[in-house]
Amino acid sequence: MKHLFKSLIASPLLFLATVCAIQAQTTCPADRSACANEAPFTLSGASPAGGTYSGPGVSGGMFSPAVAGTGEKTITYTYDDGGNTSTCTFVITVNPTPEAREFLGIIPICVNDSPDLPEQYTTLTFLTTPAEPISVSWSGPGVTGNSATGYLFDPAMAGTGPQYIYATATSSHGCTSGPFPGLIAVDGAPAVSCPKDTTISVLDNAFTLTGAKNLTVTALPPSSALPDAGGMYTGTGVNSATGIFDPSVAGEGVHPVTYTVNNGCGPAASCIFNVKTTTLPVRLLSFVSKKKENKILLSWKTSEETGFDRFEIEKSKNPKNGFIQIGYIAGKGTTHDYSFVDNTMVAPGKPLYYRLKMVDLDGTYAYSKIVREAVDGTKAMSVYPNPASGELSVISQSDLVDIQLINLKGLTVIAQKPEQSKINFLDVRRLPVGTYIVRMKDIYGQIYQSKVAIQR
């Protein structure tokens, strides 16, 4: 060894040649390609193992096509074997992914339409940068065919309602994107149903016709701008633009009302119901309610009871949920005063609503106004503070539509038309000191009054 060391010192060129001879040589993997939307992947294949990779889109030994961007990306592999460094390079070509650039949104069609190309219903425009040839495949309910024969969407096969079909785009380099959904609204043929016949007084106010239903299956909501989207009422006394029936225009008699729906997917569908207008044989002069201990006393007065049969007394805790019959009283044939006591248990402070169903001998009937009452407990209406000096709060258990503050001379000093609110406020700071009456009217026509003092 001593002789070898001396010979190496004596011949530097021989020393360098020996060191170069033992330096490791790096080998890189073959060039490859990736898609721009491909998930980051681990770089491997270079030798000797244990080196580091660097280049566009490289971090921690991982290559991210999205970070690198499209095109040819040169990746360097570096290996250090303890002071001696060697490198090699290879190329990863990042190919573009098809991008969807145009969506037409929801396309309404009819279930009896002929099968057509799916892109006719839900067009998607695909492109790549740089541009490449792109093929599109379709899937979903009602889709038939393949890339070789072409695709069709058959609405009858898919069925009525909202139908989603999907497009998948593939570039010439095999990069895919999707599936992209397209919504097709398949409308069925028109179908309707009508309500039962009804009888009203020829003296009743005009009202909006309801009860008919558009049974057509559709994936689109009805549009108020198109009368046939939700159906149209026509007939004597009917305003077809608004669907309002006016008894005074129709006159006394039986009036057929036609409800029609036409959505363009086959013949229009229609049904007919009758609205009978008649002069009722009884005229209701008054109808009031009053607390009687923990019961409710109903009182009313009539005139002109010709051919009249009976009163049916109806009650509700919430008129929006309907009424139930709690009793009846036969007509007396002439002008009379009537009364009825609700003897059922009444919860203190809980409001109750009552109305009369007035039925004549041939079954014709009409309803009275609705009255409201509550036995002792939480008041139906209240005002506070009392006395008041600044702001007066008016609170009710039902929505109010009119509030008046009246002085003792009978003059209205404040008037409000609330938008059906249970809590309202009156500014009384500028009013003279004294006693006033707060008069309130709720959405059921019930009127309440309460005294209030204004002090400073």
Image (cartoon, rainbow, N blue to C red):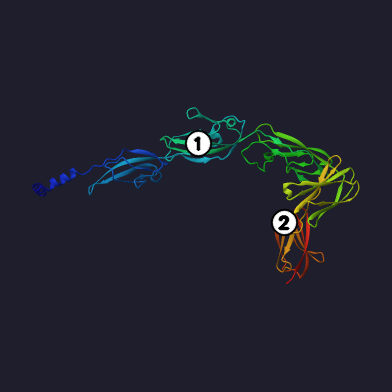
* Kind of residue at disc 2: Gln
Query: Horizontal and vertical percent for residue 216?
Result: 66, 36
Question: Would you say residue 248 is visible in this rendering?
Answer: no
Q: Position of residue 332 (x, y in %)?
A: 90, 47
Q: Tell me which corner region of the image, top left, top right, bottom left or bottom right, holds residue 452.
A: bottom right
Observer-nearest of 332 and 77:
332
Please count the marks in the image: 2
Residue bearing mark 1: 167
Residue furthest to the left in view is 3
Task: Choose top left, top right, bottom left or bottom right for residue 45.
Answer: top left
Q: The C terminus appears in which quarter of the rendering?
A: bottom right
Q: Nearer the viewer, residue 438 or 121?
A: 438
Seen as rendered, the residue at the extreme bottom is 456
Q: Which mark is residue 228?
A: none
- Residue at the farthest right position: 334
The residue at which mark 2 appears reads as 397
Q: Amino acid at mark 1?
A: Ala
Secondary structure of the residue carrying tag 1 is: strand
Residue 248 lies, in percent from the top left, at: 82, 44
Decide: few, some or many residues near mark 2? Use Cα within 10 Å; few <14, some 14-19, many ≥20. some
Q: Is residue 223 left or right of residue 163?
A: right
Query: Are dots 1 and 2 in contact, CB under 8 Å?
Result: no
Q: For mark 1, does the 10 Å Cα neighbourhood hold few (<14), some (14 to 19), or many (20 or more) residues? A: many
